[in-house]
Amino acid sequence: MIYKLSNAVERKVIETEFGIPFKYPHIYSPSLIINGFNETNLSVVTMESPYEINYAIWGLMPQNFKEDWHIFQNNANTLNVGLRELENIQWMRESLEERRCLIIVSGFYTHLLHNGGTSTYHLYKPSQKPFMLAGVYNVLEDGFYCSALITSSADTSISSYHDLSNMVPVVIRKEDVGLWLSQDTSLDQVKEYVERPPKVNLKAELISNGVFAKNLSFTSDLRTINIKN
């Protein structure tokens, strides 16, 4: 499972990379660490509005849900959802069929058991450009979006840096954006993509575990806080 992301790139970089604008551009700010255990927003592109970037609370809740995020997440951690849950839980299955989204990030954090403790890695594209992760979303009773990462056990290259769980995010290539967001894409095609995602080249850098305890401001170069071996 993945509970921390990064989106440490400027808004114009994201808009240029994907060729679509933010719906509310002045709300966006780069974030070195997006901690899913705090109520926080993700930048998303939805099936409903594929030509603009919107915001969604991280943590999937049922469609038209009224209760508070904290109450729901205390009862059911839905920052990540796997294919089995999406297929077998009715309100989640509807999201997979009708409300898929793309979650924009510049990287995510993984953890590996090492010498009686854990090592933390930051995974990102060698180009340091933003990329997209597979997700699903719902619309809450107040009109806000909520979303979850879709995770899979298929990508062994990511698993090399993440053994606290065998579930890792599914990276969606730019050329597959239309397939993922299209209402014409069948559920079988969606499942096939999640179960056998195309290989994507990501770079992994070891960082200090203490980074999560610091109140860090935005920096475009995470390597300033990396461990140097």
Image: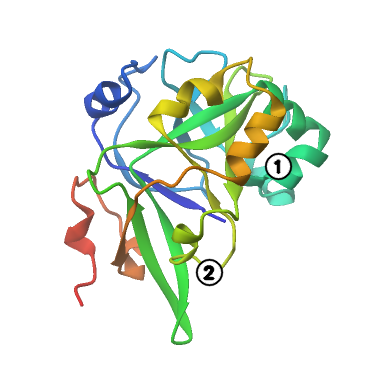
Above or below, comparing residue 102 to residue 105 in the picture: above
Q: Residue at x 74, y 49 (%)?
A: 75
Whole-percent x, y for residue 142 in the image = 63, 18
User: Which element is circle 2 on?
Assistant: loop
What's the residue at 30%, 69% (across, down)? 208
Residue type at the position of mark 1:
Phe
Q: Residue at position x 40%, y 46% from top? A: 200
User: 156 and 133: which one is in front?
Assistant: 156
Q: What colour scheme governs how the chains and residues are painted in the rendered image of this protein?
A: rainbow
| Drawn side of residue 95 relative to residue 122, left or right | right
Residue 60 shows in this picture: no
Report whether 13 appears left or right of 24. left
Q: Residue 187 in the image: x percent, y percent? A: 70, 28
- Give whichever of discs 1 and 2 has the lower sequence position: 1
The residue closer to the viewer here, 204 or 23, is 204
Task: Give whichever of 33, 193 is nearer the camera.
Answer: 193
* Quadrant of the snapshot with the C terminus: bottom left
Residue where numbered disc 1 is placed: 72
Give the x, y percent position of residue 59.
Answer: 60, 40
Residue 163's tag is: 2
